[in-house]
Image: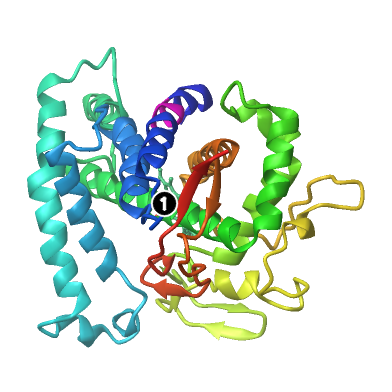
Amino acid sequence: MGRFTMEAKIMEEVTVFLDILEQEDRHSGFDVHNHLTVSVSAIISSLIFGKHFTHDDPYFVRLLDCLYRLSKVVTPDASNFIPGISLLPNSNFRRFKTYYNEVKTDFFEKEIAEHTARLDTENPRDFIDVYLTKMIELRKAGKHTTFSEEQLLVLVSDIFGAGSETTTTTLKWAFLYMIRHPDKQSKVQEELDRVIGRSRLPCLNDQASLLYTQATLFEVFRRSSVVPLGVFHAAVKETTLAGYRIPEGAIIGPNLWGIHHDPALWQNPNEFQPERFLDSDGNLMKPDTLLPFSAGLRTCIGELLARQEAFLFFASVLQRFNLVPPEGGPVPEDSGLLSIVLASKPYKMRAIVR
Ligand code: HEM
């Protein structure tokens, strides 16, 4: 995920997204969900498949629909702790298997087969090519390896699943908080106008000079905690942590939402307050307790990409638009809906060109 290659790909999608917002704006407002999902997924798809899909490509729209249904049945429910539940006829696990098979056979297996047929090991074009090239190299060298076609399939599905909805959900929260807190929105816009102006779009190098904008994104990451219970892991052996015995095989879910809303760590944790990440001289502070991507050896592999996407989409949208509720319409609520991500409830907004 080389910084500059990804920046160019993200900005291609940001530009399309800004035009869509401008076209969509109407007094009654619109739901940004579908357009944002397509934009963010198009970035992942160019990384993994090397393909740039347009927003109305029927193949891509169907893939996203399948992935959406899949994501809704991946929930931290009782089946994680009571294994028998997953065998019940209508369990989330059974539905997961049905939806996963659909995505696997209709999309991912086909893409991998196409890549295998066209592979040029000297010129890998995307993630699948790089993986296949490495697998062939290891097999030729007769080395024991975990690289396999089956692993690649699961990886592609993991990266799509983990990389698209998380980022989309974060950005939807970011827009929602800006609508709920117009004073914070104006402060971000004042900073963008002062540092960048309006004649060019923001770029990653601007981050170092946009401290209030960054603090606002930190606060979005904290307050929304889009992966509230992290990803569950199992203890590989018995251990003791803070006086508690953790038996081998126990399922562990880190309560990231709990850390982000602990009053012992954050003053008025339920308030949206970007200023908590700035010291009295206006310098940005990142406390160790801000952990949207979790911690430890298995922390999110997409953190860098996600931070870049969040910054470039957020800064570009606020540079061009004022985000407000629909005319006479409700201000969006800040309570969430839980699946594996904690999403905002569907809401409508207006994006008025500044
Ligand atoms: C704002 C956006 C995102 C958030 C908040 C987020 C958060 C997380 C969290 C909390 C985990 C669990 C780590 C653990 O097991 O302890 C995780 C895992 C993961 N994330 Fe992200 N993520 C985001 C974006 C992305 C993106 C853009 C990608 C891919 C390009 C990605 C790929 C993954 C993968 C593959 C895993 C599983 C890693 C493993 O199994 O070891 N994520 N993410």
The image quadrant that residue 342 belongs to is: bottom left
Q: Position of residue 189 (x, y in %)?
A: 67, 41
Task: Check the picture and name the quadrant holding the N terminus.
Answer: top left
Q: Residue at x 68, y 27 (%)?
A: 196
Q: Is residue 11 magenta?
A: yes
Name the residue beneath numbered marker 1: 168
Q: Is residue 81 magenta?
A: no
Task: Check the picture and name the quadrant holding the C terminus.
Answer: top right
The magenta span reads 9-13
Query: In the rendered view, does 184 fall on the left or right side of 125?
Result: right
33 in relation to 189, above or below: below
Give the structural element (helix, strand or loop) at label 1.
Answer: helix
Query: In the rendered view, does 190 fall on the left or right side of 159?
Result: right
Q: Crowding at label 1, few (<14), some or many (≥20) Cα neighbours within 10 Å?
A: many
The image quadrant that residue 107 belongs to is: top left
Q: Nearer the viewer, residue 220 or 90?
A: 220
Q: Position of residue 239 (x, y in %)?
A: 55, 76
204 in relation to 250, above or below: above
123 in relation to 100, above or below: above
Q: Position of residue 98 (x, y in %)?
A: 10, 65
Q: Residue at x 67, y 34 (%)?
A: 207
Q: Say if residue 293 shows up in the picture.
A: no
Q: Position of residue 240 (x, y in %)?
A: 60, 79
Q: Say if residue 281 shows up in the picture.
A: yes
83 in relation to 273, above or below: below
Q: Main secondary structure of the magenta part?
A: helix
Q: Amino acid at mark 1?
A: Thr
